[in-house]
Image (tube, helix red, strand yellow):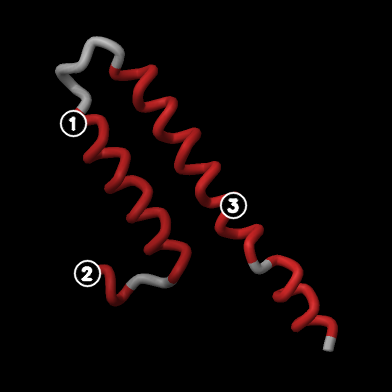
Amino acid sequence: MVANMNEYTKGAFECLSWLEDRTSRLETERNRWETLTREIAEAITDIRRGVGVDFRERLRATMH
């Protein structure tokens, strides 16, 4: 199923699958919404750091 999706759709599917998994695993936790909110924030931070790692190199590559 995933093989036939474009990159944008794959990313959305991955994200929604992760959220579905996390919400089901956190269902019995008392502070589930706080935990989920923290995990989402941490995931966004991870993405920002990952994107920023080679930003200047990619920028230079597009200028040549």
Contact (Cβ within 8 Å) of mark 1 with mark 2? no
Label 1 to label 2, Cα distance in Å?
22 Å
Disc ID at residue 47: none
> What's the residue type where badge 2 is placed?
Met
Label 3 neighbourhood size at 10 Å, few (<14), some (14-19), many (20+)?
Answer: few
Residue linked to disc 2:
1
Residue at 34% x, 55% y is: 13
Residue at 42% x, 59% y is: 11
* Residue at the front extreme, as displayed: 53
Q: Secondary structure at mark 1?
A: helix
Which image quarter: residue 52? bottom right
Measured from the top left, where is residue 37 in percent x and y?
Answer: 43, 25
> What's the residue type where badge 3 is placed?
Arg
Residue linked to disc 1:
24
- The quadrant the N terminus occupies is bottom left
Classify residue 19 as left or right of residue 26. Answer: right
Residue at 56% x, 58% y is: 50
Q: Is residue 56 above or below residue 17?
A: below
